[in-house]
Image (cartoon, coloured by chain):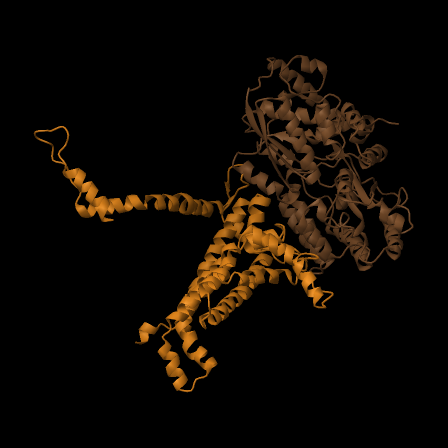
Amino acid sequence: MVSRRDFLRLAAGTAAAAAAAPLLGQSASASVRSAARVKYPKSADIQVAWWGGTTRDARTEEVIKLFESQHKGWHVTPFFSDFSNYFDAMNVKAAAGDLPDVVQLGGSYVPEYADEHQLLSLDNLSYGDKADHAKGGSVIDLTGFDPGQLLGGTVNRHLYAVTLGGNMPAVVYNETLIKKAGMQPPPKNYTWAEFESYLEELKKKLPSGVYPCDDNSGTGGPVMSVWVLQKYRRMYTPAGQLAFGVKELEDYFSYWQNLRNKGLIVPGTLEAASIQNGTNEGNPLVLGQAVFTFQYSNFLSQYQPLMKDKVGLIRYPLGPKGSLVGDFVQASQFFSVSAHSKAPTVAANFINFCVNNPHAVRALGVERGIPAAVRNEKEVLHSPRLTASDRAEVAFEAEYGPLTRAEPVAPGKSGALTSIFQNAAQDIALGTSSISQASEQAMSLARRALS
Amino acid sequence: MASPGVTVEAHATAPPPVADRNPPPRRRLTRRQREALAGYLFLAPWFLGLIGITLGPMIASLWLSFTRYNLLSAPQWTGFSNYSALVHDPLFLTAVKVTLLYVGVSVPSQLAFALLLALVLNRGMRALGLVRAIYYVPSLLGSSVAIAIVWRTLFGYDGTIDRIVEFFGWHNPPAWIDDPHTAIYTLVVLAIWQFGAPMIIFLAGLRNIPKELYEAASVDGARRFAQFRKVTLPLLSPLILFNLVLQVIASFQAFTPAYVISGGSGGPANSTLFYTLYLYQQAFGQLNMGYGAAMAWLLLVAIALVTAAIFASSRRWVFYMDHQS
């Protein structure tokens, strides 16, 4: 079997590896300059912030307790909320120069906060190889980390964020319900068109009140991105605008509208209830209302503990023959250190603890994705706490990760697009806008947000 | 305010501990000036608050409304571009429509309900004080996050209201907060439920209407409804004006219920996108603080104009008894 690191190298491509190399070199030369040993304060109080569901909260709090018990005098104050309100809170804290010492970030927020000088460069606090470490002055051990994921935390050739694990787009399905319906999950290499006919057949065999699929036209995983990337080489132009036009958006929404008209996805009002709920517990798949939901791979280990039915993973549908590969492995989320942290070495030490301490790595499992270094992935795989669904998640990424493309680079301002496209999808689902109206409006809002 | 003045004077007239043969002539404050000074000193905390946490930020926000400001780096002057962008922003127009609908429906409904309850309570009942207090409780709680969460549970998917109407045989009720056609009205019901404050004011007003007027009216043959129209409403009209102005201002600024019930999105399909909620999304979600500041100032002007219009119209429908006597 190809090792995960190998395929991630493949996935990230030579470009990624080449771009990450000077980064590691840089941290080496930097630590020559600050050859002194890292100075830690005797006592420190750091704040650690993350978003997530109840399982993540429990796992992270366990690691915090472990960290505190091994470092007397260091105290960690946790701050967590669900995703929907997390960045509002972080934005306000950032504006007040009060970003938590360790802050969980995702996607476009790393370049956005780094560009605004809110994040501490970790070049001097991290090291990529033993020789580098021997010179002293560094805290976070990044040896063997997947270059693609390191690149995801890099802005203008400086490392600002350390990956907490890799994930990729994946469809989560309720295996129990499919079995009860006397069917098999969709075959490998199925297309969007085949997915539709599969759902039609499944619908006939499902009990009433259960829909074949969640409405993921605007929620869940990066469905639209994958759809677009199956046709376009990139998502954004070099100038940071969308690389596709309104026609593409209309096609995408039409696909979902067709599923909706046939009763194959949950109705707009149910989806609205799920959005309002905003937690994993309110997801239609978890509630038993839908058999399939488009997500990221690490949601398997988030949903399974909440459900009695067994859940599994399949890859997103493929485009018609001749299409490009649309899915990608990415750092599911990062830890960064605030530029205003009063105890940056302690904050960096906490991050290192999370990604490298064997007990912490086991406690965190694969809930935030699969550890970015093979040595830590092995730690997780040998952990007695690893569940069957965790194993399924690892196996899924091992199988499909090598087949993916490089992660598309998102401009710093793209954070606003999620809600713009979610609103458009909801307008269509609830019938308050036509597909063309909603698409036009979303496109013009997106253009303005990105400009 | 006499005692501080007296104390100051007592100290002032006491002989100085170290005697000085020829003390230089000291300018003395008159008693009036001293009292004024004391008065301002007592007012100082309020003044500081007014300047520091109301006026200062207001002026700053006026300035910010002419800038592009993302909270994290310094604002850049952009003139009127925020204001002109508002006109072309479809979501801004949606937010204005949603807010006008909310104010237009919730304020009259709430005032009518408050008046109705005040009339019922005014007919006299045992333990009136207790009932009045209980009815006032929702006004204290109504705009809190906790109540908004309760509301979400009541009107949410498979929530309490669904169970109740199902019990009465309505098997396919609307999706309440999840349906763009009904979501806003669950917020209206929440507003009506906070009828306590206007009710108390109406009740006080009703008690002040002289009994003789009703007696005279009934001698003239006026029935109950005619009495209500010809005696109660005119004499209550100053309080209706008062309640109307207060509630209109408060409704334009409503935020918490829409934020909590829609999970901060203003959904479903932007049907609960209150003006203040969109302002918040722009300012803190998308970091367009300048745009948000422009929206805030526009809201201030709009509320001022609406309030002025209500006052202007009041000459036609508000009746002050003392003017007539």
Whole-percent x, y for residue A107 in the image: 68, 37
Whole-percent x, y for residue A404 in the image: 82, 35
What color does chain B have in the rendering? orange
Left/right of residue A97 with respect to residue B324 in the rendered view: right
Quadrant hosting residue A261: bottom right
Name the image quarter holding the N terminus of chain A: top right
| For residue A309, above or below residue A432 | above
At horizontal 89% and vertical 48% (from top left) the residue drawn is A179
At horizontal 78% and vertical 31% (from top left) the residue drawn is A385
Report if residue B239 is visible in the image.
Answer: yes
Left/right of residue A204 with respect to residue B224 in the rendered view: right
Whole-percent x, y for residue B164 in the image: 67, 63
Report if residue B244 is visible in the image.
Answer: no
According to the colouring, which chain is brown?
A
Left/right of residue A47 with respect to residue A438 in the rendered view: left
At horizontal 57% and vertical 28% (from top left) the residue drawn is A46
| For residue A370, above or below residue B122 | above
